[in-house]
Amino acid sequence: MPELPEVETIKRQLESQILGSEIVGIVVNDSRCFVAGRKGVEGEVIKEILRVGKYLFVRFSSGRGLQIHLKMTGRVVVEQETQNMEYAEAKHTRVVITLRDKRRIFYWDTRMFGYIKVLENVETEHEALKKKLGPEPWDITDIDLLRKFKRTGRAVKEVILDQNVLAGVGNIYANDGLWLAGMNPRRIAKSLKPKEVARLRKSLCKVLERGLATGGASDNSYVNAYGEKGSYQDEFLTYRRAGEPCKKCGKLVERIVVGGRGTWVCGKCQK
DNA sequence: ATCAGCCCCTGCTAGC
DNA sequence: TGCTAGCAGGGGCTGA
C-alpha cells in the first residue's frame, strides 16, 4: 500500500513528467473514484505537485486542482512513448486524463478505496490538511513526539499509524520501524521513556528513507508513476515475514494483531 | 479530547 | 472441482 515513500516517489516523477501540461480530456469509468462539482478540468494547466503525508495534490495555474489518495491499491501511471498503454484497456482503470501532447494519465485502483477529488482551491485545502495531520517523522522533535505519546493510553503502533499524530507512516514502515527500534508494538505509548521515543523516531525516519531509496514497497499492488515496481519488499525487516528468522537474533518472526492490523514481531528483540 | 467500532470495496485464500 | 465465508486494510465517520 502506498505510504509516504511510495507517494513521494510518485510526486517526484509527476513533477518531472507533467508540469506545464494542459489537460484536454477526461474519462471517468467509475464515478466512485472521481469526486467533482459541476466544473470540469479541461483546459487546466498543471502547475505544481504537492504531497502531505499520503495525500497528493495537483495544482493548476488557475488555483484549482486535484487531491489524490491511493489508499490500498491505487496507482497513478503516466503513459510513456512505448509503455503503459495497456492501462487504457485495463479492467481497473477508473479515470483517464488526456494531456495536450496526447499522453494519458491513468488512475487505476482495484479496491476503489482511493479517489481523485477536484478542488476549487488547492492552496487552502493543502494548508488545512497540513494543519489537521501530524508532522512527518523527520519534522518533529523527540520532545514533541514524547508529549503526544504521553497523552494517550493506546498501543504505540496504533499511535504511529494515526495520521493526526504522525503523517505518512503506514503498516509496512510502522512494523519495520518498531523492529529496528527494538520496540514491542503493544507497548502503551505513554509508558515510553524519552530515550525510547527518540530511538523510535530515528528508526521510523531510517526505514522511510530506505523505502524512498529503494523506490518503495511493491509487495502488494504498488507501482510508481512509470508503472514500475519498487524493491523495498526485498528487504522487509519484519513486515509479512511470519515464520522467517529475525534478522537480528534468528528467532522466528510471529504475526499478531494490534489495533486490528496485521503486525509482525520478534518476541526476543522487541520488548 | 480520546477512542473503539463500523464501513467502504474487490481479490485472494482457506475450508468444506 | 467449485462454492462461499472470511480476511486484508487507510481513513472518514459516528457515538460513547
Image: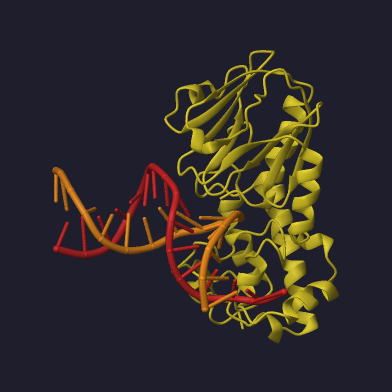
Chain colours: A yellow, B red, C orange
Q: Vertically, is A93 above or below B14?
A: above
Q: Vertically, is A3 above or below A46?
A: below
Q: Residue at x 69, y 73 (%)?
A: A181
Q: Position of residue A252 (x, y in %)?
A: 48, 74
Viewer-side residue, A62 vs A266:
A62
Q: Quadrant of the C terminus of chain A?
A: bottom right
Q: Residue at x 76, y 77 (%)?
A: A197
Q: Position of residue A108 (x, y in %)?
A: 52, 34
Locate residue A106 relative to residue A59 in the image: left or right. Answer: left
Q: Is residue A198 visible?
A: no
Locate residue A101 relative to residue A62 in the image: left or right. Answer: left
Viewer-side residue, A53 vs A249:
A53
Q: Position of residue A64 (x, y in %)?
A: 76, 31
Viewer-side residue, A128 vs A16:
A128
Q: Position of residue A211 (x, y in %)?
A: 67, 52
The image shows a total of numbered marks equal to 0
Locate residue A167 relative to residue B12 in the image: left or right. Answer: right
Q: Residue at x 72, y 66 (%)?
A: A165
Query: Quadrant of residue A159 in the image?
Result: bottom right
Viewer-side residue, A141 vs A122:
A122
Query: Quadrant of residue B11 in the image?
Result: top left
Q: Is residue A216 visible?
A: yes
Q: Vertically, is A240 above or below A55?
A: below
